[in-house]
Amino acid sequence: MTRQEVLSVIGSADDITVAEIIATGASIEELREAWAWAFADEALMGQGRPLPGTRGAALIDLLKPDEDDPVEPGTRLE
């Protein structure tokens, strides 16, 4: 996966976050699925979608903001 592919899914992000996402070895499809699970998990559960695997879970951990450091709604990762 390339930096451009990562940014096409998640929007803007710092170089470290992009590098960590690429280092998971995930495909662009796995990143799209992880993004959906990170920010719309209830909708996906309602559709009966299976939970993401290990790689998807690692991506979700990278994508979701820490609960101790909440991100204001409407802001993007920088």
Image (cartoon, rainbow, N blue to C red):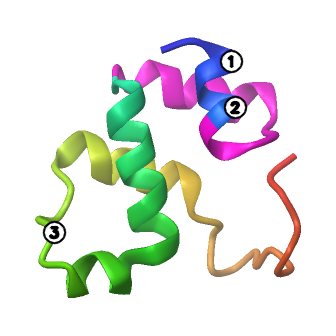
Q: Considering the numbered disc 1 on the image, is that residue within a helix, a strand or a loop?
A: helix
Q: CA distance from mark 1 to mark 2?
A: 5 Å
Cβ atoms at labels 1 and 2 below 8 Å apart: yes
The kind of secondary structure the magenta stretch mainly shows is: helix
Tag 2: residue type?
Answer: Leu
Q: Nearer the viewer, residue 47 or 1?
A: 47
Which residue appears at 35% of the width and 34% of the height? Answer: 29
**Magenta span:** 9-25
Is residue 58 rendered to the left or right of residue 77?
left
x%, y% of residue 48? Answer: 12, 78
Q: Which mark is residue 49?
A: 3
Is residue 47 rendered to the left or right of residue 24?
left
Instruction: Inspect the magenta stretch and tell me whether residue 11 lies in it.
Output: yes
x%, y% of residue 43? Answer: 35, 83
Tag 1: residue type?
Answer: Gln
The residue labelled by disc 1 is 4
Is residue 2 rendered to the left or right of residue 12?
left
Q: Considering the numbered disc 3 on the image, is that residue within a helix, a strand or a loop?
A: loop
Q: Which mark is residue 7?
A: 2
Which residue appears at 60% of the width and 40% of the height? Answer: 9
Tag 3: residue type?
Answer: Arg
